[in-house]
Structures are given as structure tokens and as C-alpha cells.
Image (cartoon, grey):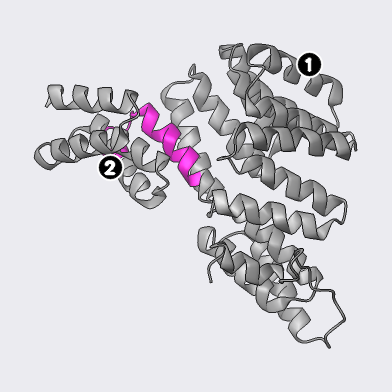
């Protein structure tokens, strides 16, 4: 058992996820009580995007060993990605209770609290992560971004500069700079940084989501739709993108398209207050006479909702 677990770890370290998963599956068939194997299996599945299977393995790991710190932290990440911030917070809180001195436990707790809009608490968690590990540049990036959103630009800049010095080529630094420029109303500079981030990490959706949000702020609807759709091609389970697209389509009185996007968002988080509010808005609009609205379209004249389905984005 120990040899097979060591082999799986080695394969995982070499990036040979498929072989590592096969070894873990074989180990767990004979020894289903090995919590570390369940955790590693969950880690591989999460990296592969199979979130439901990942959560099942991580739940098994924490059931076998309630003090499996890594499993609680990873569960918080996965549940947050699935649009379940309340459940993610329970996992993050559990991780902090297990090991109060673990920097990454406070980091994920800050990320969850920020998603929930509990910004002061999120700042406190990020600050604790930085106190525990001053080299944790991700915590500094997130802290800087949140401070900039709150208008505390001097504090934000201090954190972002330190993060940049720690890792000058990391995508999160460009995103944090973009967030700072956006908070200061310098939208051209924000767009420049987000586009640089997208080039640095073409397989990550965050920069495209941020671009969509800036374009939405600027009433550049066509560019916003494109950015959110690009993000969804990279991360098809982004509830934020579906909600933003639903808002755009509601504004254009494209209620069927808005419904489609809203259903996708609710599939990921049925308790979302934002989604439920949008649902009520759509229902109210269906009872009103139609108003003229320009259908946002691409350069080829094709409407974006159809383009979304054509490109494999969205539930339809």
C-alpha cells in the first residue's frame, strides 16, 4: 500500500495525472480507508475539471480523517469554483480551526469571504495569511485587489508592489494592477493589464471575466459579451459569466437568451440571491409590452446567443 501511494505521488509530481489516478484507484479498491489516497484522487480530478467526482473523493477523505487539512482547503476551492460560497466558507473555517497557523487556510477563507461580499472579514483573512507568510504573493495580490475595490488605493498599491517584486511574471500581479486601475477609474490602463494577463495565462478565465466587467462598466456591450463568452469557453462553470450575460440580455429585452443564461447560473448555485432577483425581473418584463432593443451581434452579423451555442458555450 505504501509503495503504491508513493508511486502515485511520484507520478503526480511528474504531471502524469492519468497514471497517478490509475494507481490511486487500484489502491483504493483494496484499501478504501486511506484518506491521503482519497485526497490525492480529489486533487487530480479537480485539476481535470471533474468537480463532482473531486468533491466525492474529498468528502471521503474528510470523513475518514476529519483533520485532513489539505482536503478541507481543496474542498473550499472546488466549492467556490462551483458557485457554492457558503459551503466553501464552512470548509475554509474548518481548515482554519484545524491549523490556525496555516497561511493557505486563511488565504482561501479570504477568497471565499470576498466572494460573499464580506470584504472587511476578507481583508482580515488575507492580512493574517501575509503575517504568517510574507512571501505569499497570491494573498498580497488578492488583498491589493480588494483594497483597491474599496478605494484604499495607497494600501492596495503597497501590497501589489510587494507581490510584483516577489513574482514579476505572474498573471495575478497583472490582474491585481488591472483591478487597481479599474478602482481608480483608469479603464484604458485596466484593459491593458487584463489583456496582458490573458496573454500570460491563456487557459485561465479570470482576465477575460475582468475585461467583461470593465466593458460592461463602459457600456461596451459587444466587447463585454465577447469577453464573458471567451471566459466560458475556458471555464464553462463560471456562474459570474452566466449572470453577467443574463443581465446584458435582460437589458436588451432578449428574455429567452437571458433565461438560458440564468438557468445555467442557477444550476451551479440554486440559492444565488442575484440569480433569483434576475429571475423575478425577467418574469416582470414578460408581462410588459416589448421595447425596441438592438440585438448585440458580432462582426459577421450573427447574434451572440446563437454564437454562444455554436462555440459550445452555455447550456443549450
Return the residue nearer the eye: 137 or 269.
137
Q: Secondary structure at mark 1?
A: helix
Q: Examine the rendered structure and indicate whether residue 184 appears above or below residue 2.
A: below
Return the residue nearer the eye: 259 or 64.
259
Q: Of the residues tagged 2 and 1, which is closer to the observer?
A: 1
Q: Image point 31% across, 35% down: which residue?
A: 17
Main secondary-structure element of the magenta-colored stretch: helix
Q: Examine the rendered structure and indicate whether residue 253 appears above or below residue 128.
A: below
Task: Judge whether residue 308 can be spotted in this image.
Answer: yes
The alpha-carbon separation of the residues under discs 2 and 1 comes to 42 Å
Numbered label attached to residue 248? none
- Going by the image, does 227 lie left or right of 75? right
N-term-proximal mark, 2 vs 1: 2
Q: Image point 77% across, 28% down: which residue?
A: 177
Image: magenta residue range:
61-79
Q: Residue 37 falls in which quadrant of the image? A: top left
Task: Judge whether residue 32 can be spotted in this image.
Answer: no
Q: Position of residue 103 (x, y in %)?
A: 52, 19
Q: Position of residue 136 (x, y in %)?
A: 58, 17
Q: Spot the residue most to the front.
A: 300
- Going by the image, does 258 lie left or right of 69? right
Q: Image point 54% across, 49% down: which residue?
A: 235
- Going by the image, does 255 lie left or right of 46? right
Within-10-Å neighbours for mark 2: few <14, some 14–19, many 20+: many
Q: Which residue is mark 1?
A: 158
Q: Which residue is mark 2?
A: 60
Q: Secondary structure at mark 2?
A: helix
Q: Image point 76% across, 71% down: which residue?
A: 301
- Going by the image, does 193 lie left or right of 81? right
Q: Spot the residue most to the left.
A: 30
Amino acid at each position: 500500500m505504501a509503495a503504491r501511494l508513493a508511486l502515485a505521488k511520484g507520478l503526480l509530481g511528474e504531471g502524469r495525472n492519468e497514471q497517478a489516478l490509475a494507481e490511486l484507484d487500484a489502491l483504493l479498491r483494496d484499501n478504501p480507508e486511506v484518506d491521503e489516497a482519497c485526497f490525492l484522487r480529489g486533487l487530480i480530478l479537480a485539476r481535470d475539471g471533474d468537480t463532482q467526482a473531486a468533491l466525492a473523493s474529498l468528502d471521503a477523505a474528510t470523513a475518514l480523517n476529519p483533520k485532513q487539512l489539505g482536503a478541507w482547503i481543496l474542498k473550499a476551492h472546488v466549492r467556490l469554483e462551483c458557485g457554492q460560497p457558503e459551503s466553501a466558507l464552512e470548509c475554509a473555517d474548518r481548515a482554519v480551526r484545524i491549523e490556525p497557523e496555516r497561511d493557505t487556510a486563511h488565504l482561501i477563507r479570504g477568497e471565499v469571504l470576498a466572494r460573499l461580499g464580506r470584504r472587511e472579514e476578507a481583508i482580515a483573512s488575507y492580512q493574517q495569511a501575509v503575517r504568517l507568510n510574507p512571501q505569499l504573493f497570491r494573498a498580497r495580490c488578492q488583498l491589493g485587489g480588494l483594497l483597491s475595490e474599496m478605494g484604499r488605493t495607497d494600501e492596495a498599491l503597497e501590497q501589489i508592489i510587494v507581490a510584483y517584486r516577489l513574482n514579476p511574471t505572474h498573471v495575478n500581479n497583472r490582474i491585481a494592477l488591472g483591478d487597481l486601475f479599474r478602482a481608480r477609474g483608469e479603464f484604458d490602463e485596466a484593459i491593458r493589464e487584463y489583456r496582458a494577463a490573458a496573454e500570460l495565462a491563456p487557459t485561465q478565465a479570470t482576465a477575460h471575466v475582468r475585461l467583461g466587467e470593465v466593458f460592461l462598466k463602459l457600456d461596451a456591450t459587444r466587447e463585454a459579451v465577447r469577453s464573458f463568452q471567451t471566459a466560458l469557453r475556458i471555464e464553462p462553470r463560471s456562474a459570474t459569466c452566466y449572470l453577467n450575460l443574463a443581465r446584458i440580455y435582460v437589458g436588451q429585452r432578449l428574455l429567452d437568451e437571458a433565461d438560458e443564461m440564468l438557468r445555467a447560473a442557477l444550476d451551479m448555485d440554486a440559492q444565488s440571491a442575484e440569480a433569483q432577483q434576475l429571475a423575478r425581473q425577467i418574469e416582470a418584463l414578460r408581462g410588459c409590452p416589448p421595447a425596441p432593443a438592438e440585438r448585440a451581434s458580432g462582426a459577421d452579423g450573427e447574434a451572440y446567443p446563437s454564437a454562444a451555442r455554436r462555440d459550445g458555450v452555455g447550456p443549450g
